Amino acid sequence: MSATPETAPVTPGAGGGPLLAVDDLRVGFATEDGRLQAVDGVSFELEAGEVLAIVGESGSGKSVTAQTIIGLTRSPNSHIEGSVRLSGEELTTQSESDLQSVRGSKIAMIFQDPMTSLNPVYTVGRQIVEAIRAHDSSIDRKSAHAQAAELLGAVGIPDAERRVDDYPHEFSGGMRQRAMIAMGLALEPSVLIADEPTTALDVTIQAQILHLIQDLNRSRGLATILITHDLGVVAEVADRVLVMYGGKVVEEGTLDDIFYDPQHPYTWGLLGSLTRLDQPRPHRLPQISGAPPSLLNLPKGCAFRPRCPHEFAKCAEVPGLEARLPGEPGHRDRCWLPPEQKRKLREIGGRIGLEEPA
Amino acid sequence: MARFLVRRLIGAIAVLFAISVLVFLIFNVVPATNPAQRIAGKNATPQLIKNVEEEWGFNKSLPAQYWTQMKLIFTGKVVSYNSHINIDKRILEGIPATASLCIGAAIIWLSFGILFGYLSAIRAGGLTDRVLTVVALIGISMPVFWLASILLYYFTYKIELFPPSGYKPLSEPREWFSHLILPWITLAVLFVGFYSRVLRSSMLDVMNEDYVRTARAKGLSSRRVMTRHVLRNSLIPIVTLFGLDFGAVIGGGAIVTEYMFNIEGVGLFTAEALKQQDFPSIMAVAIFGAFFIVLFNTLVDVAYAYLDPRIRLGTAAA
């Protein structure tokens, strides 16, 4: 793999701080029905080589969080507060043109639907060349093109030398997502944000793409933020997990924390709706009743309260994101229930869940 | 590509045949006056009229008359019932004037239509957009004859900036240019309005496409995102419109503009032919116009394949 020597991987900031630090990020959009608070005080840190999964239902604010990191949600209608620091460098206050040099070169992003994420009128190679040359115009077209072919080969596209001149519609869905990843890797970024990278793909292709991301994460130390609603995907690759609900993080912890000792009833609901081979097959998969709340009109107190069967008086107060288990400072959640009671409540018929399957 | 063109050619011939039959039937089913009567003159004796009918073949069956007419048109021998001048020659003589008018106007309407549409789209909702929206609506609403009169009144009569109407051949470039400026503007204004509106809405659609977000996410400047990704993908409706509009005006459709500025082109000839109900002229002009519309529509289909690689001509025509 040829590297562009000018763009060495970003080293962690001075004082050994995290590679990417998001602190109390708030993103609101002005809509006709009032202000919509899509992201409400999200904080997390990402170290080099780490895979952080952000999970939640549609509308929980996970994609907005990710897009705000590279400034894609900036618009006259949006209001962004809080801080995003890459190697100590603040991104939220950077000018649009400064951010352009970060996008793609230091933080790359790939999106949900590879069928529509590539421009249909340009060849795949040309779109990769465009990404390379946007950040370093001294590279001539020819060597950028050769580099594009090489990148496609590196992400597992067979016959890349020839396929580099294909149009996106000549690629299958999985190949297009590989091409998106190749484009993201072109400038050797230190962070990859993958926004539901496997949602639109067949199950077998999903696994291939996940393994590719995992490989890149391991072989290049590429810090990855994986946004998904699919806990199966999370279990496969994540080191740490953030669970989002109504624009807030409701639980965060290591992969094992979340899967084996989930604290928030919403997380139980997500886990309960997974199919599992190691347990008797339920007649029907349990689901979390109700729908995600409208971000324009969030419930008072805990946002999950209206859907939570274990709601009690205290839930009228907004719970903070706190470590509630002794000796586990990294495992934090927003639920007022005492931990010992949670352990009792979450086991339903031998499995974690919110409700009995119907 | 070759197969596509052959198929299109066959289609074009069918279209031209259908149009010529239609025009022929319309003017034979609803004639205002008997053509023989008109050719023979107002005070002609019945015998003279009969002779004319013999001589011009008006007493033959309709298919025979159609056949004769088409043969005359395509061999360049067709003459006007009224003035007896050769119609094909007259149309050919009108082509330089019409082409000068239409090509010049097309350059104006395409450049300004795209420019205004682009500015409107990238400033959607802002002041520039609102001003351009009003400008476009004024342009679309202004009748051509009225705009032509106003321009003529102010620019040639009041301040005498441009010479009065008429057409000067390209061999006198300065005269040619100064005589055509007002007609170009007149013909282009309506299209500028239309094209800018169409491009604006097309670009606003494309801006929401996922690949535009990808383009931003890879760090392209907003100008490059707008031109290379948004504008490029918004051009298909513009190309479609342009094929139809340009084919129509160059085929003699710029009737009002040519009439108002007394440009002796195909459009003015069409106007005269219609006024005098001169059947052979109308027939020839209709076929001439239809030919250009078919031609430019075929070119539009070829252009699609270049604009969007997903379109393959072989299957697109099927």
Image (cartoon, coloured by chain):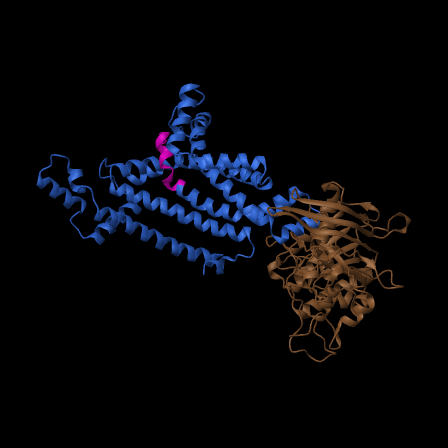
Chain colours: A brown, B blue
Tell me which residue sits at (47%, 44%) in the image. Answer: B242
Q: Main secondary structure of the magenta part?
A: helix
Q: Is residue A7 toward the left or the right of residue B113 in the image?
A: right
Question: Which of A243/A112 is in front?
Answer: A243
Q: Nearer the viewer, residue B195 or A315?
A: A315
Quadrant into which the C terminus of chain B falls: bottom left
Q: Name the outermost residue toward the front.
A: A313
Q: Residue furthest right?
A: A15
User: x%, y% of residue B221?
Assistant: 68, 43
Can the viewer see residue A149? no
Whether B136 is drawn above or below B29: the answer is: above
Q: Residue at x 35, y 53 (%)?
A: B15
**Rendered view: A154 above or below B23:** below
Q: Position of residue A56 (x, y in %)?
A: 71, 61
Residue B29 visible to an observer of this rendering: yes
- Identify the residue at horizontal 73%, vertical 49% (top origin): A26
Q: Which residues are magenta?
A: B249-264
Residue B101 found in image quarter: top left
Residue A302's x, y, as percent? 73, 58
Choose top left, top right, bottom left or bottom right for residue B103. top left
Q: Please tell me whether residue A207 is drawn above or below residue A142 in the rendered image.
A: below
Please check the rendered image and state whether residue A92 is part of the magenta-colored stretch, yes or no. no
The residue closer to the viewer here, B215 or A149, is: B215
Quarter of the image where one finds residue A149? bottom right
